[in-house]
């Protein structure tokens, strides 16, 4: 009997231990499930964070994009930078600009006459003007009044009148303060353009002829200008003593000469001969 009771107690204790063991197993499984669930959630969060981080990395400009952007900004900066387009002016141009506005009796201002080649500045604040006179053309000649100013154009004093042969006359105001005269079809009837160097000598206009300087100018067909017939000459100032010349044959209206001519040597020779 005692053995049966002892056996029953032992069996009861073993069953209790067995049930306790099963309960712990369920708890462990639940704990494992919770752990797996937490890990899974952490994994999802981590994946989302990794995706966001990758997107942020993709949005960041690369080194090449930075360089390209810098180049674009540099290009824009260069395009937007103001250009220095104001040309430099020479001392002679400054002297011309310093002469005050003044209108002569002919209706021409000093600036007008300078553009026509009939006025020039020869020193700072000093200038002269060759002014057409009303009814000044007579007997194959044309007469001009000459005026001089030493106070920047505020006052003009009359000087000796100037006379030149009538014809197709081109006057060019040079940057040394003198004037170059190219004359064709004058009463003198030369077969080539007559060129003279005009300058103010304190009393009036002094004209120095550049003897035959264009007589031997060779045209495109080999003909010398002195031997050409029925032609016209156009002259445009370049700088110094250089002038762009264009000769047109009036029979065919073709250009038979076009080039730049330097009168420096001819002017020096003519002045030395005075």
Image (cartoon, rainbow, N blue to C red):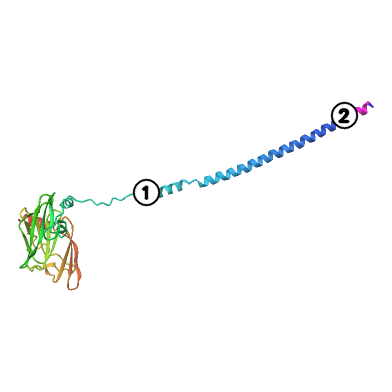
Position of 39 compared to 243: left or right? Answer: right
Position of 257 compared to 76: left or right? Answer: left
| Residue 215 visible | no
- Residue 79 image offset from top left, x and y in percent: 35, 51
Where 148 sits versus 12, above or below? below
The label nearer to you, 2 versus 1, is 1
Classify 10 Å Cα crowding around label 2: few (below 14), some (14-19), many (20 and above).
few
Examine the residues drawn in magenta and state their main secondary structure: helix
Residue 134, quarter of picture: bottom left
Q: Nearer the viewer, residue 197 or 165?
A: 165
Magenta extent: 2-9
* Quadrant position of the C terminus in the picture: bottom left
* Quadrant position of the N terminus in the picture: top right
Classify 10 Å Cα crowding around label 1: few (below 14), some (14-19), many (20 and above).
few
- Residue 56 image offset from top left, x and y in percent: 53, 45
Q: Nearer the viewer, residue 89 or 151?
A: 151
Q: Nearer the viewer, residue 174 or 97?
A: 97
Element under label 1? helix
- Residue 64 image offset from top left, x and y in percent: 45, 47
Which mark sits nearer the N-terminus, 2 or 1?
Answer: 2
* Residue found farthest to the bottom: 251
Q: Residue at x 90, y 29 (%)?
A: 7
- The answer to whether the residues at label 2 and label 1 have Cβ atoms under 8 Å apart is no
Judge whether residue 7 is colored magenta.
Answer: yes
Q: Which residue is mark 1?
A: 77
* Residue found farthest to the top: 2
Element under label 2? helix
Q: Which residue is mark 2?
A: 10
| Residue 24 visible | yes
- Residue 22 image offset from top left, x and y in percent: 79, 36
Q: CA distance from mark 2 to mark 1?
A: 97 Å
Position of 80 compared to 257: left or right? Answer: right
């Amino acid at each position: 009997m005692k053995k049966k009771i002892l056996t029953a107690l032992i069996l009861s204790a073993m069953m209790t231990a067995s049930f306790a063991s099963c309960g712990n197993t369920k708890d462990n499984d639940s704990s494992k499930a919770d752990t797996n669930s937490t890990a899974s959630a952490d994994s999802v969060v981590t994946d989302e964070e990794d995706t966001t981080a990758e997107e942020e990395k993709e949005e960041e400009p690369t080194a090449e994009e930075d360089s390209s952007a810098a180049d674009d900004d540099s290009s824009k900066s260069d395009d937007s930078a103001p250009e220095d387009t104001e040309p430099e002016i020479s001392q002679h141009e400054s002297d011309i600009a310093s002469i005050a506005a003044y209108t002569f009796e002919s209706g021409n201002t000093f600036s007008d006459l300078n553009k026509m080649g009939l006025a020039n500045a020869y020193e700072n604040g000093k200038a002269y003007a060759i002014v057409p006179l009303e009814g000044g053309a007579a007997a194959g000649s044309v007469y001009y009044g000459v005026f001089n100013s030493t106070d920047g154009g505020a006052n003009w004093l009359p000087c000796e009148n100037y006379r030149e042969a009538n014809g197709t006359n081109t006057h060019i105001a040079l940057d040394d303060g003198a004037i170059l005269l190219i004359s064709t079809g004058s009463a003198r009837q030369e077969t080539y353009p007559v060129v003279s160097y005009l300058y103010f000598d304190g009393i009036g206009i002094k004209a120095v002829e550049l003897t035959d300087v264009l007589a031997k100018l060779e045209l495109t067909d080999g003909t010398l200008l002195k031997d050409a017939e029925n032609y016209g000459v156009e002259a445009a100032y370049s700088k110094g003593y250089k002038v762009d010349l264009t000769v047109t044959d009036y029979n065919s209206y073709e250009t038979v000469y076009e080039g730049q001519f330097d009168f420096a040597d001819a002017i020096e020779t003519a002045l030395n001969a005075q």
